[in-house]
Amino acid sequence: MLSVFGLLEIYSVALGQGDLDLINFYKQALFIGIGLIFLFTFSLIDYRFLKSTRRYIFLFGALILGAVLIFGSDIRGTKGWFSIAGFGIQPVELIKIILLIFLAGYFADLATKVKTLRHFIISAVGAGFMMLLVLLQPDFGSALMLGAIWLILVALAGFPKKYFISIFGVALIVFVISWSFLFKDYQKQRILTLVNPGENTLVEGYNVSQAIIAVGSGSWHGKGVGFGSQSQLKFLPEAQNDFIFAVIAEELGFLGVCLVLFFFAVFFSRCLVAAKRAPNDFCIYFILGGAGLIFIQMFINIGMNIGIVPVVGLSLPFISYGGSSIFSLFILVGIIENIIIKSKINY
């Protein structure tokens, strides 16, 4: 149902852009169809095979990230895509699932052991290595999500609280160093725009201000599919990707937004039920880590659209346009489905 909402709004955006052949709509429909094939395929692959081969899967992921830095296409200043037969494949979306498998397996092996600083550092090095490769593209938003996956699983693993205090301190130091030496001007401006969204609404704050206007103008029932002024008249940039939530709010209104959030809530509630019935620690870590990943990305994307989170280029799960995101998310759901199937068989 979330993917159907995405198709509906991608169709609407295409109308406003005069795209009479609806190429992006058809592409997204194709992506969802292929994604469903991935879903059913991975629902038939024993999750225990993924757990046992997690080191090789992690190595494969690192090689992909290395390859995209060398052979990838540069799109809007980020070298994070492979161009294949006219389609752009963004491997970092798959890396999120790979890192989740690796860390879930690692922490599952520690379930009966005392969680020491050594274990904490090893897991941080693994996640940090992937984050570094993604930051070299540079893709700050995706690197942030990889860090979030690690933080979720570290919290679930039950490490001492003092470690989390140290994480906050290190993150603060890294932020200060990054602000001084690594962040580009547009990245700094995104953060400053969050503090004062009313400043430079025609330049750096344009995207956010247009998204807020779109969200607010939807009222209760919305303006109708294809009748959103901000999206149809091209005031709203990246309407089918980063700011598709604003399109939903403008055209379907508050009730449409509530329906979308309801479908997300159903997904998260089913993940919690599956986690409670999971047969082992790996399954619990994977399901809760996957649900946490989708929740955080959903929260950040919606926050970007209403001006409470800096714009970091993250899509709305299951809804935004993009094959790489759809494929990885459907693979994630497929693995969770396999865990549910195996738990019923074991039960």
Image: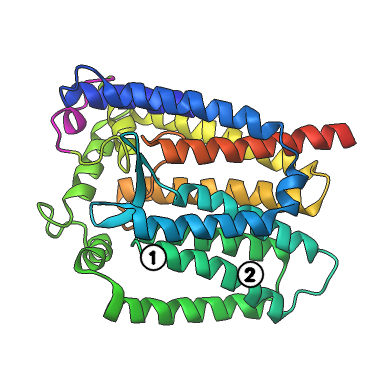
Q: Is residue 4 left or right of residue 37?
A: left
Assess whether residue 234 is covered by the magenta stretch.
yes
* Residue sitting nearer the eye, 97 or 59: 59
Q: Give the range drawn in magenta.
A: 225-235
Q: Is there any visible trace of residue 308 in the rendered image?
A: no
The quadrant the C terminus occupies is top right
Is residue 164 shown above or below 198?
below
Tag 2–tag 1 contact (CB < 8 Å) = no
Assess whether residue 30 is covered by the magenta stretch.
no
Type of the residue with mark 1 = Leu
Q: Is there any visible trace of residue 136 in the rendered image?
A: yes
Q: Mark 2 points at which residue?
A: 123
Residue 99: where, in percent of width, then height? 58, 57
Residue 331: where, in percent of width, then height? 58, 38
Residue 47: where, in percent of width, then height? 73, 43
Tell me which secondary structure the magenta stretch mostly adopts: loop
* Other-residue count near label 2 (Cα within 10 Å), few / some / many at <14 / 14–19 / ≥20: some
| Residue at x-position 64% and y-position 60% | 153
Q: Is residue 151 left or right of residue 296?
A: right
Residue 190: where, in percent of width, then height? 25, 61
* Residue sitting nearer the eye, 77 or 18: 77
| Residue at x-position 24% and y-position 42% | 211
**Residue 229 found in image quarter:** top left
Q: Distance between the residues labelled 2 and 1?
A: 18 Å
